[in-house]
Every structure is written in C-alpha cells, then in structure tokens.
Amino acid sequence: QVHLVESGGGLVQAGGSLRLSCAVSILTFSTSFVGWFRQAPGKGREFVAGISWRGGSTYYADSMRGRLTISRDDAKNTVYLRMNSLKPEDTAVYYCAARQGASFYTNDGYYNYWGQGTQVTVSS
C-alpha cells in the first residue's frame, strides 16, 4: 500500500511563496510518476505539476508555468512543489498523487494513490 502525506500549505499573502512537500512511502519507486493537483471550491481537480521519479523529467500546467518548481529528494522519498508569486486564484486544496509507470498524464484518473490534501489560501 502506498501512502502519500502532504504538508506545507497555509495562509500567504498575494505575491508570497510556499513550498509543499509530499512524503511517499513505498519500497520501490523507481518507475513512478508523482503529480500535484489542486481543487478550488466549486471546481474540478486540475493538474499543476509532475515529475518522473527515475528520470526527473518535469511538467507544469500552462496556467502556472514560470511560478512553479517541482523537485524530488531520493533519499527522503519526498517530492516538493515550490510556488512563487502566488495569487488569490491559486487558493485551493493541493493534492499529491502517484502512479506506477513513468508516463506523464494530466488526467487525475490515471493516478492510483492520493494524499489527503493540504489547504493553500492566498489573501489579496
């Protein structure tokens, strides 16, 4: 069973930054892809960023490109999402998700494992 635990969310003023963490517990993760999604109130879940665990390839949503950096720490089995220049419209619950296989998908239906989410609130 794979467990993902997000942390790092909170309240930040517009223009500020946050770093979200996703701790992944699994024995072997060399062929997995980890993605970040978000869901704002009244909206569907949308892809934000993703990283291939083995190769380290990264992918970003066009809407947030340039303001995000996704990275991983192999030793800690942790994926980070650094978000800069945050806007009130970035307010959402942010979820970490994982799937076996290193393929890139923005559709959340391709992800098998999900964390509980962490709230990010950006005040104007």
Image: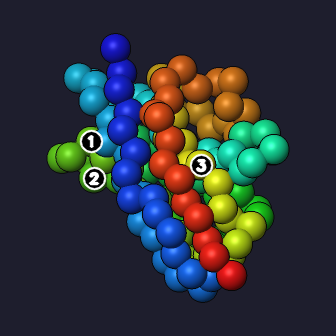
Depicted 17 relative to depicted 27: above or below: below
Q: Earlier in the sequence, mark 2 or mark 3?
A: 2
> Quarter-wise, where is residue 28 in the image?
top left
Local secondary structure at mark 3 = strand
Q: Residue at x 39, y 59 (%)?
A: 8
Q: Which residue is mark 2?
A: 73
Left or right: residue 63 versus residue 10 is: right
Residue at numbered disc 3: 93
Inspect the image, locate mark 3, and give the three-letter code of the amino acid beneath it: Val
Query: Which circle, 1 or 3, is nearer the viewer?
Result: 3
Using the image as rendered, state which of residue 119 and residue 47 is in the foreground.
119
Q: Type of residue at label 1?
A: Asn
Which residue is depicted at the point 73% across and 33% down? 107
Residues at marks 1 and 3, CA–CA distance in whole angstroms: 22 Å
- The amino acid at mark 2 is Asp
Residue 19: quadrant of the picture: bottom left
Image coordinates of residue 2 in percent, x first then y, are 36, 21
Q: Which residue is mark 1?
A: 77
Dots 2 and 1: beta carbons under 8 Å? yes
Give the label, 2 or 3, closer to the camera: 3
Q: Quadrant of the C terminus?
A: bottom right
Q: Residue at x 62, y 38 (%)?
A: 104
